Image (spheres, rainbow, N blue to C red):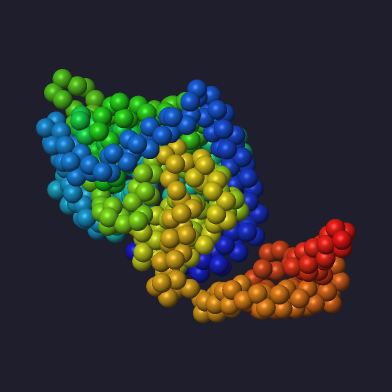
Amino acid sequence: MHQQIPPFAERVATALHDDMLQTAISRSASRFIANRTNAIGALSDEGALRDQARAIRANALAHLDELLCRLADNVQAQGGYVCWAEDGAAVSQYIADLARTRAVQLIVKSKSMASEEIHLNQALEAAGLTIAETDLGEYIIQLAGETPSHIIAPAIHKTREQVSDLFHQHLGMPPTDDIPTMTRTARTALRQRFLQADMGISGVNFGIANSGAVVLVTNEGNGRLTTTTPRIHVAIMGIERVVESLDDLAVLLQVLARSATGQKLSVYTTMVSGPARAAEPDGPEEFHLILLDNGRSAILGSQYVESLLCIRCGACLNICPVYQSIGGHAYGGVYPGPIGSVLTPLLQPDLPDSYELPYASSLCGACQDVCPVRIAIPDMLLRLRADAVKAGKSARTEALAIRGWQTIMSNPAFYQAGGKLAALSTSIRGSSNFHHLPPPLNAWTHQRDFPPFARQTFTQWWAEREHTRNNQEQ
């Protein structure tokens, strides 16, 4: 379910020339990076903790079938319901049917990237239901009619001035850029939604197999209101997000918050274990856990299985020079940034130009350096590029250029002649840079100048050096 969107190159160009977007990203990215650096640096043995976190996630994937069955059994033993959903259509149908049989009209929703992945809001609205996002960032972009541009900060692309305009337009707030005033306005508008809602939908950061609990990690109280105030709670969990025990969870929580926002621990870490018991005054009457596959099983048996280790901290987005330049929407899919350039071609292959996303990387390796579970993102980006070439999705001019480069580099005579020709061709211009080159080389000069080649090639310089040294020795 994808709307017609401009080609990837056009989306990138638009983002690069969006001054408000550049301002918003620069304000946030540097703060995220600094906070993470300080939080990780405070650990006594950061490397060992990350190794342990990776081992926990790898062990869960290796025993995924067993852990998921144990999780489902424990959820049902506590009075909950479990739905095994093959894809987004199955999730939407299950929730729509549940809402119809329980006379649900209004649904409040906590932040869930899994629900964004399957376009849940659009499907439920088509079924006649009203969906209210309650995470502040998600609420902002819902008012704007947009999608998230970051894994943990959905409205990172908005400046406070733009948010003020939205609240003035939709909530009648007097114009102001005072953040406490804006958050108070949003809180007032959302409070009635929580009280009126019949169903709450949340994501799941981790499911604990041994206890049947699902864990929500948030920095806002909306997560707890969504899961306890409505009479029905539906939690949507990607099947890879299971862990075995509370001990495993404790390790992952230490690296998640530090990597995501630079906190030792998020403000709210909520564990939900089924519906409210008879003696409990709070909690839903019904609890439904939806285990979403949506292509994950296919990844398990592939060379990209490591991508499922991701705990959605967003650290790779914050550090990535490409994401810092173009933001999240330019990627076109639900998951942006380095990990999104891997996940989107795998989980959303119907996105027309998803095969181009792995090329949106300098392969600097910063994403792997900051990943709390050490995912080898650059390696997978290269594999996806190779897959695109094998599938015939690379440009014909690119294939010809690579073949020409191969011919020149494997033949010393061609290589030397090419170096001399290149030096001669740019020496006509003198020592100044080229601001414009003819197609297809203009793709380079659209963004940067092209420096002239050295008048003397390295081969020539080396030959002269050897000649001079030999004469001196004689």
In front of the other: 48 or 236: 48
Answer whether residue 273 is visible to the viewer in this image: yes
The N terminus, quarter of image: bottom left
The residue lying furthest to the front in this view is 474
In front of the other: 88 or 53: 53
In front of the other: 328 or 134: 328
In the image, residue 342 above or below residue 47: below
Q: Residue at x 23, y 46 (%)?
A: 291
| Number of residue marks | 0
Q: Is residue 290 left or right of residue 424?
A: left
**Where is residue 441 shown, x and y percent of the image?**
66, 74
Place residue 459 in its image quadrant. Answer: bottom right
**Where is residue 463 shown, x and y percent of the image?**
78, 67
In the image, residue 13 above or below residue 92: below
**Where is residue 452 shown, x and y percent of the image?**
78, 68
Q: Residue at x 57, y 38 (%)?
A: 33
Q: Residue at x 35, y 56 (%)?
A: 303
Q: Is residue 471 left or right of residue 289?
A: right
**Where is residue 106 shown, x and y percent of the image?**
28, 45
The C terminus, quarter of image: bottom right
Q: Residue at x 38, y 50 (%)?
A: 307
Answer whether residue 132 is visible to the viewer in this image: no
In front of the other: 310 or 90: 310
Place residue 232 in its image quadrant. Answer: top left
In the image, residue 131 above or below residue 461: above
Place residue 19 in its image quadrant. Answer: bottom right
